[in-house]
Image (spheres, rainbow, N blue to C red):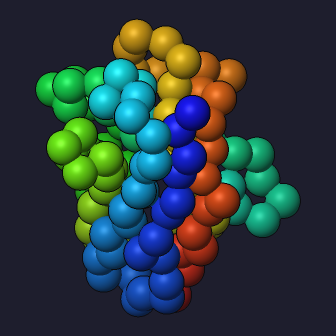
Amino acid sequence: QVQLVESGGGLVQAVGSLRLSCAASGRTFSSRVMGWFRQAPEKEREFVASISMSGRSTYYADSVKGRFTISRDNAKNTGDLQMNSLKPEDTAVYYCAAGTGLYTTDSPNKYNTWGQGTQVTVSS
């Protein structure tokens, strides 16, 4: 069973950058689609980005396309989310997740393993 732990969150000014990391335990990480989601106060959890098992295919929410980059290193059992040109509306708790399907997806129902989350706060 895969377990996920996020790190790298913090406080940053608008237009700044942060890099989130997701460390996975377990031998099956490379066989799982990986995703990042976020949840702002009083809002539903929303999709941010997803990456295929091999890392060759990625999928982004329109709101972050061109600013965020998802990546993974299966040899190290890690996944990253590089966030550039941050905006105050990016403020949220960010979660990494491991999927159950074969393809990248924006549906939280297709992920069954979640980290505990890391807070990202972007000040204006």
Of residues 75 and 9, the one drawn nearer to the viewer in this rendering: 75
Which residue does the image show at 42% across and 87% down from the upper left? Answer: 12
Question: Residue 7: x, y in percent?
Answer: 46, 71
Q: Please, is residue 36 above or below residue 10 in the view?
A: above
Say if residue 89 shows up in the picture: no
Which residue does the image show at 76% across and 46% down from the upper left? Answer: 44
Which residue does the image show at 78% across and 65% down from the upper left? Answer: 41
**Quarter of the N terminus within the rendering:** top right
Question: Residue 70: x, y in percent?
Answer: 28, 46
Q: List the single residue furthest toward the front.
A: 27
Q: Please, is residue 99 above or below residue 118 in the view?
A: above
Of residues 40 and 23, the one drawn nearer to the viewer in this rendering: 23
Asked which quadrant contains residue 40, the reply is bottom right
Asked if residue 41 lies left or right of residue 76, the reply is right
Which residue does the image show at 52% across and 60% down from the upper left? Answer: 5
Say if residue 77 shows up in the picture: yes
Of residues 39 and 113, the one drawn nearer to the viewer in this rendering: 113
Number of marks drawn: 0
Q: Please, is residue 108 above or below residue 117 in the view?
A: above
